[in-house]
Amino acid sequence: MVNENTIYFWLGLSGITSKRANALAEKFSPFELWERVGKTLTEKSLFGEKAYDALVRFHSEEFLAQSIDKLDDMGISFITYDKFPDKLRQKEVDPPVMLYYRGNAALLNTESVAVVGTRACSAYGKEAATRLVKDLCESNVTVVSGLASGVDTYAHRAALRADGKTIAVLGSGLNCVTPLGNVGLCNEIIESGGLVVSEYPPRYAATKYTFPERNRIISGLSAGVIVVEAALKSGALITANYALEQNRTVFAVPGNITSVKSVGTNRLLYEGAVPALCAADVCDTLGLDCAKIVKKPRAIQLDIFEQKIYNILLSGEENFDSLVIKAELPPPKLSAVLSAMEIKGIIDKKQSNFYRLA
């Protein structure tokens, strides 16, 4: 006799949508489905015709046992809906039937916060993500992200450097990591005691639909979602919308109002998102039981010229000559402003007269 875990695995193999699976779970127990499919339950509309035909085709204890053995051979495990943490089983999350995973599945039950943002992030976005993640990890918070380029990559790497824990939620199967350049990062996460999960079969290639779909799981695993940097149509905003539907707290990192990469985050703030100025803001708002709460930074008052330089350097480092042109300041005045900002600890001067935010 098959057990409940195997039946959920069987349902997952069929490709049944999470919405249909959740609707069926309200009407039938897993064992009822197993006993009736292909026998007395003929309403294909409940499953969708393709999924129903697949369930009939896969209705074999021997076949399912062999399929699970093949997963083991690939070093892949699976966790089914009945063993999900409560936060992921929440109806508003639209949970999948099962998740394939590599790594430490115990992280699913830890205090988690998602850190997401644009793939084409600026130097400011990279720095903001890195600092937030470092401090969150030092406060024993697990960082969840999507292993995409840009902010996601910097978030995962910052967690690894801080000896913290991180969960990567893929928009593809575990054997089809996208982008290819992050295959190494994926392995590092697993080897460091982190976790990589996907609702898609191991060899399932990513599509334009799977990335938005997986975003609901990123927010579903998290107490809150921090959007670091996002354009107006960024996928990170899809994650923020899922978070709101799931009653999660949405945070946004304030950005340069002249940067297209901050239009989305600044819009979130305008609509009521919580400003994420440091990790303490996040921990305090969520009431997380953290081992270490990072002190909030001291506010520094900038004059009109310093603010102009600050806004320019948000996009990355610049040399003195470039700043003269962009800030529209005469060299003597610019030199005085830069010196004052260095003394205040706002900027750093590098070799060859390059400046960057401290």
Image (cartoon, grey):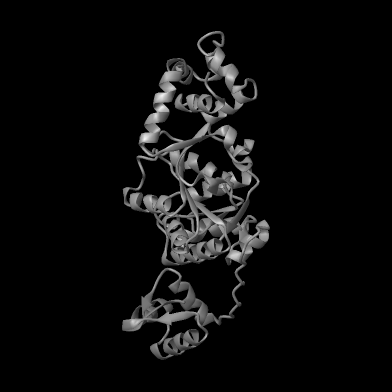
Q: Nearer the viewer, residue 230 or 210?
A: 210
Residue drawn at point x = 44 percent, y = 73 percent: 312
Q: Residue 37: where, in percent of width, then height?
A: 53, 14
Residue 158 percent location from the top left of the image:
45, 62
| Left or right placement of residue 346 versus residue 320 in this view | right
- 108 up-or-down from 100: above or below: below
Q: Residue at x 60, y 69 (%)?
A: 294
In screen coordinates, is 201 left or right of 11?
A: left
Residue 65 appears in which quarter of the rendering? top left
Total labels: the figure holds 0
- In the rendered view, would you say 171 is above or below 165? above
Q: Position of residue 113 (x, y in %)?
A: 57, 54
Q: Residue at x 53, y 42 (%)?
A: 217
Residue 76 visible from this viewpoint = yes
Relative image position of residue 60 (x, y in whole percent): 45, 17
Q: In the displayed image of the protein, which residue is found farthest to the top?
A: 40
Quick check: 59 above or below 138? above
Furthest-front residue in this view? 1
Residue 12 or residue 79, whichever sits in front: 79
| Residue 204 appears anywhere in the view | no
